[in-house]
Image: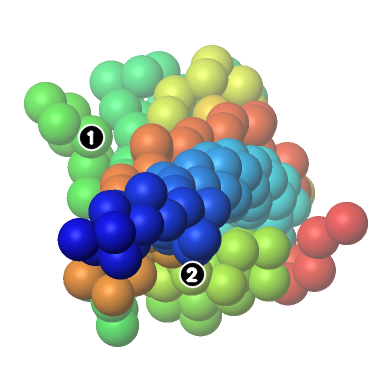
Amino acid sequence: MTRLFDLVRNENGASAAEFALVLPILLIALIGTIDVGLYAWNINQAEKATQTGARWAVATDMVASGLKTYSFAVSGGVPQGTVVDQTAFPGVTCQSNGTTASCTCASGGTCSFPLTADNAAFTRLVTRMAQIDGDITASNVVVTYAWSGLGFSGDPNGPDVAPLTTVSLRNMTYTPLTTLLFQVSVPLPSFAYALTMEDGSGTVSN
C-alpha cells in the first residue's frame, strides 16, 4: 500500500510530460509564424514581378502585334496626325491558354484592326516575370492595352496609339508549411501594374 501511495505521489518525469503536451502548440505557433512571413514574401515577390512585367511590356514588342502594325490613317479612316478616338481603339486584352497567346477586343467595343497576338513576345514577357517569381506561368499573366488619348494617327515611328498598358497577375497560390502534407494552398491576391506604352518594339528592357 505504501509503495502504491509513493507511486501516486512520484513526480519524476512530470516536466517531460508537460513539455510533451506543450511542444505541439509551440511547433504550430513557430511554423505558423514562418508561414505568415513566407506568405508576405510571396506577395512581395509577385508584386515585384508584376511591376517588372509592366516595364517589359511597354519597352519591348507589343503582344497585340496587329495593333502595332495597323495604320489608323491608311486603314482606319482617322485623319493623319490626329489622336485616335476611343471608339476606334476601345482597348485590347491579351492572355494565354497556357500554350498560345490570343487577343480580344474590349467588351462592348469594335476593333477594326487585326486582333493578332505575338506569341513570342508574350513568352518573353512571362519568362522575364518568372525570373522574379518562379511560380509564374503563361496562364497567370494578362496584358491589357487601354485607350489613353496619346499618340497620333499615321505615326511613322511606331504604333498610332500609345495605350495604357496593364500587366496583371492572377490565380497565384501559396502552400503553407502547416498544410504541406495535405497539399492545401492559399490563394494570393491579384496584382496589376500599369504604364504608358513607350516604343513597343524590341526584345530587351532596362
Q: In the image, is 147 to the left or to the right of 94?
A: right
Q: In the image, is 67 to the left or to the right of 1?
A: right
How far apart in space, not on screen, are marks 1 and 2 (Cα)?
28 Å
Q: In the image, is 121 to the left or to the right of 200?
A: left
Q: Quadrant of residue 180?
A: bottom left
In depth, the one of 85 and 173 nearer the eye is 173
**Residue 105: % across, % down:** 22, 42
Residue 137 visible somewhere in the drawing: yes
Marker disc for residue 19: none
In depth, the one of 18 and 206 nearer the eye is 18
Residue 160 visible somewhere in the drawing: no
Residue ID for mark 1: 106
Q: Which SS class for mark 2?
A: loop
Which one is in front in this view, the residue at disc 1 or the one at disc 2? Answer: 2
Q: Identify which amino acid the numbered label 2 is placed on.
A: Asp
Instruction: Please give the name of the residue rendered at 68% of the width and 63% of the height, measured from the top-left corner.
Output: 132
Q: Quadrant of the N terminus?
A: bottom left
Instruction: Please give the name of the residue rendered at 68% of the width and 71% of the height, measured from the top-left corner.
Output: 131
Instruction: Please give the name of the residue rendered at 46% of the width and 37% of the height, measured from the top-left corner.
Output: 191
Q: Residues within 10 Å of mark 2 (few under 14, many from 20)?
A: some
Q: Identify which amino acid the numbered label 1 is placed on.
A: Ala
Tell how many labels. 2
6 is higher (above) or lower (below) than 161: below
**Residue 193: % across, % down:** 56, 34
In depth, the one of 1 and 26 nearer the eye is 1
Q: Quadrant of the C terminus?
A: bottom right
Marker disc for residue 135: 2
Q: Residues within 10 Å of mark 1 (few under 14, many from 20)?
A: some
197 is higher (above) or lower (below) than 1: above
Q: Which SS class for mark 1?
A: loop
